[in-house]
Amino acid sequence: MSVTQHRHYINGQFVENRSDRWIEVINPATGALLSRIPEGEREDAGRAVDAAEAAQPGWEALPAVERGQWLHKIATEIRRREPEIAATIVAEGGKTQQLAQTEVLFTADYLDYMAEWARRYEGEILQSDRQDETILVFKKAIGVTAGILPWNFPFFLIARKAAPALVTGNTIVIKPSELTPNNAMLFADIVNELGLPPGVFNLVTGYGPQVGQALAENPKVGLLSLTGSVNAGIATLKAAADNITKVSLELGGKAPAIVMNDADLDLAVKAIVSSRMINTGQVCNCAERLYVQAGVYDEMVKRLEVAFGAVTSGDPASRDDIDMGPLISAEALTRMEQKVARSLEQGATLVCGGKRSGDSGFFFEPTLLTDVRQEMDIMREETFGPVLPVMKFDTLEEAIALANDSEYGLTSSLYTRDLITTLRALKQLKCGETYVNRENFEAMQGFHAGWRKSGIGGADGRHGLEEYLQTHVAYLQY
């Protein structure tokens, strides 16, 4: 059976691979070869940036509402092609059918949401200290932007970067993850069929050290937005430094979840298990370490063990009744085995799980660890898999100190029925987001941003839109 060989999308055209080197895209549930994508070179990234630069003035000249109408058109076509896109995400990412469908429809909703900002983002008129003077603050496009994507929510992240960029008059170059690029090809196909002006949206495939580095180093790129690992963020910052390029980074997380004695344990177990198992634990903002107050610790561990044992897994392409699929790659599977082994070496107790599941694909059992200590690797390093360490605490002050004791600061969660406890925790937790009595999943109208090594800048809502704008202040003396 022939395997699809994709092409870059540059300046309104699908262009052939000039390097003659290809990257194979593998189904993580079966190991089957799905497609090949071009192993892009620096020159490919440069051509895409040049196309985006040439298209940007004309795109910015359009009324914002017309730019927003293009986003509405893309959203409508995404909904029409939802089954095809969702099936693609399932095959290349190992995501469950329900989660893949949610991602596709959420992406369409996000495009519509950002399109509506076309009539809403605005500048300001400031009071002057001088007589007969008016001060105006204009909000203008940055120019050419670039987005480097992860593999865990690959389709949504296209919209998270492209939608605010395009509605505010910027053009964009996207580099998808080499592990999950097929869905991005469908996005490019949609904008191509709709006739989006050439150069407004461009797509180049390849590895980060080549294509991503070239985008970060290109002096024509005014903003580079990356979602990925801390190491990738550091490399991006260094590459962008020579040109003082604006960089927005969403990096790793080690989200703490705090369960107080007065918590609704049924709710807490359901939300924490959902947060830990969604996308097989491969989500940067979901609960990575659990702190349970002493009065309910034993009961919470008992309930978690039952809940973990009830989690179902399998090939998501052939079953729609499972809770999670495989890890993304063989490397991820090996890393998970090593993390659990290291935890046991350091003194943790394995309550359930802890090993590979099945003989094919990259499946790993839901794993619960107790008797952990704050200094253990499993409590400090990002896990990115279906493994949850649980630690006991006595007071809220102790829990907050433990939660803040991390180089990350993306999200956190709290389970309590007491308003005073909630307000005290919200005042003291050092992270970009806190979820109270609910799972860790952000809203498009919020602002998804991390503290410390979890990133700089952010996405979503009005604040995320303004990442793609720069100010121009005018002093009018008359």
Image (cartoon, rainbow, N blue to C red):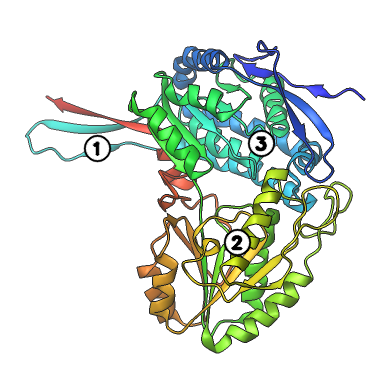
Marks 2 and 1, the one that precedes in the sequence: 1
Find disc 1 in the rendering and name its residue: 125
The front one of 49 and 377 is 377
Residue 37 locus on image (x, y percent): 71, 24
**Where the C terminus falls, by quadrant?**
top left
Dot 1 crowding, Cα within 10 Å, few <14, some 14–19, many 20+: few
Q: Nearer the viewer, residue 218 or 391?
A: 391
Residues at marks 1 and 3, CA–CA distance in whole angstroms: 34 Å
- Is disc 2 surrounded by few (<14), some (14 to 19) or many (20+) residues within 10 Å? some
Residue flagged by tag 2: what amino acid is it? Arg
Task: Report crowding for label 3: few under 14, some 14 to 19, many 20 or more residues within 10 A (C-alpha).
Answer: many
Residue to which mark 2 is pinned: 342
Of mark 2 and mark 3, the one earlier in the sequence is 3
How far apart are labels 2 and 3 at the CA level? 45 Å
* Residue at image location 45% in from the left, 31% down from the top: 224
Q: Are marks 2 and 1 in contact (CB under 8 Å)?
A: no
Residue farthest toward the bottom in the current orientation of the protein = 295
Check disc 3 and report the residue beneath it: 75
**x, y (%) of residue 178?**
66, 32
Residue 407 shows up from this direction: yes
Q: Quadrant of residue 86?
A: top right
| Number of numbered discs visible in the structure rendering | 3
